Image (cartoon, rainbow, N blue to C red):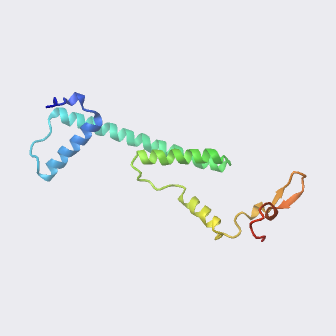
């Protein structure tokens, strides 16, 4: 038979899980005995650390979103993608409760790809060639019909 683990050997996550189960059992009437003072203290510590970690993750999410928008505004597309990926990763770690802040931007890009947004991208109608002369983007992209 394995030796029972002492409370000191249990990790904070285990303590939080055990504490939640105990509190759930008490609320459901399955357990009439309150947790010991040591368990209550361990549970309070774990909850405090959990709250602090969630606050830190929230700050990381805000920073990543700010840096992503800042990168996009400065035409730093690789950095925009980097910070978007950081935001998605931190959001998953935090429980994934937030919707993607770039959802509207992605929808606009998909509409543009489908051709449902006429006029978007028309600013690139002329591209300067290596000789200094302007050439049409239709010539640069022969697979697309000219406007």
Quadrant location, the C terminus: bottom right
The answer to whether residue 65 is visible is no
Quadrant location, the N terminus: top left
Horizontal and vertical percent position of residue 51:
34, 41
Kindly identify the residue that appears in the image at 87 percent across and 51 percent down: 130
Name the foreground residue: 66 vs 7: 7
Horizontal and vertical percent position of residue 117:
65, 69
Q: Quadrant of residue 17?
A: top left
Q: Is residue 93 left or right of residue 103?
A: left
Horizontal and vertical percent position of residue 15:
24, 37
Kindly identify the residue that appears in the image at 16 percent across and 33 percent down: 37
The answer to whether residue 111 is visible is yes
Horizontal and vertical percent position of residue 22:
17, 44
* Residue 10 sits above or below residue 120 on the image: above
How many marks on residues?
Answer: 0
Kindly identify the residue that appears in the image at 43 percent across and 42 percent down: 57
Q: Is residue 12 left or right of residue 32?
A: right
Name the foreground residue: 2 vs 112: 2
Kindly identify the residue that appears in the image at 28 percent across and 35 percent down: 12
Residue at the limit of the structure toward the left, as seen here: 32
Q: Quadrant of residue 10?
A: top left
* Residue 41 sits above or below residue 21 on the image: above
Name the foreground residue: 108 vs 138: 138
* Residue 74 sits above or below residue 136 on the image: above
Q: Quadrant of residue 142?
A: bottom right
* Residue 54 sits above or below residue 122 on the image: above
Residue at the limit of the structure toward the front, as seen here: 1
């Amino acid at each position: 038979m394995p030796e029972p683990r002492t409370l000191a050997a249990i990790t904070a996550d285990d303590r939080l899980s055990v504490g939640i189960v105990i509190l759930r059992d008490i609320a459901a009437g399955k357990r009439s005995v309150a947790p010991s003072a040591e368990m209550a203290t361990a549970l309070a510590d774990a909850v405090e650390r959990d709250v602090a970690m969630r606050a830190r993750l929230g700050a990381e999410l805000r920073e990543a979103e700010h840096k992503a928008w800042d990168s996009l505004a400065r035409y730093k597309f690789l950095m925009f993608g980097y910070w978007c990926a950081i935001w998605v990763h931190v959001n998953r770690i935090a429980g994934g409760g937030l919707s993607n802040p770039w959802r509207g931007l992605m929808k606009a890009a998909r509409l543009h790809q489908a051709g449902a947004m006429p006029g978007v991208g028309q600013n690139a109608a002329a591209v300067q060639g290596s000789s200094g002369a302007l050439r049409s983007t239709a010539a640069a992209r022969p697979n697309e019909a000219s406007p």
